[in-house]
Image (cartoon, rainbow, N blue to C red):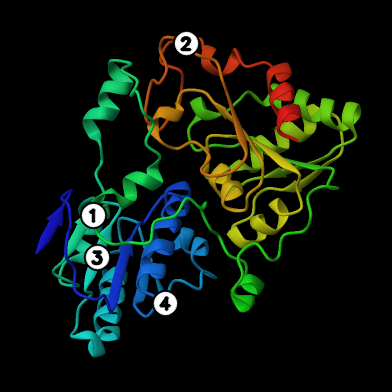
């Protein structure tokens, strides 16, 4: 039985649940509250997660998840994924060979192929395509902003889950051992570190390098802060540019392929200044106060920092948003949405937050 975007009233007790969210980093992190709520509702159920290999670190230490299935997402990955699927089926041998419930948060051809034959009851998160189109092309802003976390749980809204208003989660290994989330966090009250994440997958979501550099200089020379640059392998060049242009000593923690390593760096910071990116959601999961700089995207898309002290700094121009995910270049050529955000505005927001 495929149950798609409908209200579910009655379910038999769950023994096994599969949650599918393959990408991206931010989306995977935003799926963690739903897994927590499923686990609290069905504490004895086996909960598995299928995720793209490079984002498996989001779930690596999560004690709510029994097994993490790493899915290859390259064009030539089908044989490898077929083997994974065989392993999944074999692991279900003592559960009648299928999951009692599959929650597909990806909802595309790849996730549909993956879930085929693994269970009969499937719920899919709504894509809200019409709302996105109306927002991007007609600039029709919704009167109420629905966070992605709420959209993920909407297919199960009438199912008796234990809902909560807690934030996202990315666990560390010692927290898993202790069974207490955020137990590894040091006190940030005395921290003089400010993290900066100048990268983002799409160029129109990046505040200019010169602005990040000027901010780093102001925080370091004017306020005695230690600046830590964070990001993945794709962010090395932009972090290098910020470090060089700032003219101050910065800690380079960018280029890491380890989500856990980045978390450990973030945990030492008083706050983070970041673009709308996966690192922003990673900081959110660790309850790091966030200054989020939004350019071509807007908070109405549902991807604002979730359940964490934060300020969104944005410059409202008529052409925003020009895309729901960002673009390689500004279609108007002026990039006013980012150029219009001054260092002074970001400094002011940061001073309010910390």
Q: Give the residue pinned by disc 1.
A: 158
Q: Secondary structure at mark 1?
A: loop
Q: Measure how far apart labels 4 and 1 are at the Cα level.
A: 25 Å
x and y percentages locating residue 227 in the rendered image = 80, 40
Can residue 52 be seen here? The reply is: no
Numbered mark located on residue 66 in the image: 4
Q: Measure how far apart labels 3 and 4 are at the Cα level.
A: 15 Å
Q: Give the residue pinned by disc 3.
A: 102
Between disc 2 and disc 4, whose residue precedes? 4
Q: Is residue 7 above or below residue 338?
A: below
Q: Measure how far apart labels 2 and 3 are at the Cα level.
A: 41 Å
Between disc 4 and disc 1, whose residue precedes? 4
Q: Measure how far apart labels 2 and 4 are at the Cα level.
A: 46 Å
Please name which of the two marks, 3 or 1, marks the residue nearer to the observer.
Answer: 1
Q: Measure how far apart labels 3 and 1 are at the Cα level.
A: 16 Å
Numbered mark located on residue 317 in the image: 2
x and y percentages locating residue 286 in the rendered image = 62, 53
x and y percentages locating residue 163 in the rendered image = 39, 56
**Is the Cβ of the residue at disc 4 closer than 8 Å to that at disc 1?**
no
At a point 58% along the width and 43% down the height, the residue shown is: 308
- Dot 4 crowding, Cα within 10 Å, few <14, some 14–19, many 20+: some
At a point 37% along the width and 30% down the height, the residue shown is: 324
Between disc 1 and disc 2, whose residue precedes? 1
x and y percentages locating residue 68 in the rendered image = 41, 71
Left or right relative to 303: residue 314: right
**Is the Cβ of the residue at disc 3 closer than 8 Å to that at disc 4?**
no
């Amino acid at each position: 039985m495929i149950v798609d975007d409908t209200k579910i009233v009655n379910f038999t007790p769950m023994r096994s649940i599969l949650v599918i969210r393959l990408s991206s980093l931010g989306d995977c992190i935003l799926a963690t509250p739903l897994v927590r709520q499923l686990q609290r509702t069905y504490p004895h159920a086996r909960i598995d997660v299928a995720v793209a290999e490079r984002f498996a670190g989001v779930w690596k230490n999560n004690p709510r998840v029994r097994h993490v299935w790493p899915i290859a997402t390259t064009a030539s990955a089908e044989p490898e994924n077929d083997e994974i699927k065989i392993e999944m089926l074999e692991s279900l041998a003592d559960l009648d060979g299928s999951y009692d419930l599959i929650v597909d948060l990806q909802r595309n051809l790849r996730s549909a192929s993956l879930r085929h034959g693994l269970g009969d009851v499937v719920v899919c998160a709504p894509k809200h395509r019409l709302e996105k189109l109306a927002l991007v092309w007609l600039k029709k802003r919704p009167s109420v902003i629905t966070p992605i976390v709420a959209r993920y749980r909407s297919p199960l809204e009438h199912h008796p889950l234990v809902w909560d208003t807690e934030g996202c989660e990315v666990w560390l290994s010692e927290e898993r051992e202790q069974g207490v989330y955020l137990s590894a966090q040091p006190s940030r009250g005395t921290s003089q570190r400010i993290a900066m994440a100048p990268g983002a997958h799409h160029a129109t979501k990046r505040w200019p390098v010169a602005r990040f550099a000027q901010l780093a200089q102001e925080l370091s020379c004017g306020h005695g802060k230690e600046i830590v640059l964070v990001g993945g392998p794709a962010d090395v060049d932009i972090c290098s540019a910020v470090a060089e242009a700032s003219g101050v000593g910065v800690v380079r923690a960018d280029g890491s392929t380890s989500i856990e390593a980045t978390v450990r760096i973030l945990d030492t910071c008083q706050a983070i200044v970041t673009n709308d990116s996966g690192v922003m959601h990673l900081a959110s999961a660790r309850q790091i106060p966030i200054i989020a700089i939004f350019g071509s995207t807007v908070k109405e898309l549902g991807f604002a920092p979730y359940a964490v002290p934060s300020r969104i700094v944005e410059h409202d121009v008529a052409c925003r948003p020009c895309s729901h995910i960002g673009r390689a270049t500004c279609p108007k050529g002026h990039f006013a949405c980012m150029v219009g955000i001054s260092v002074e505005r970001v400094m002011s927001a940061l001073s309010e937050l910390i």
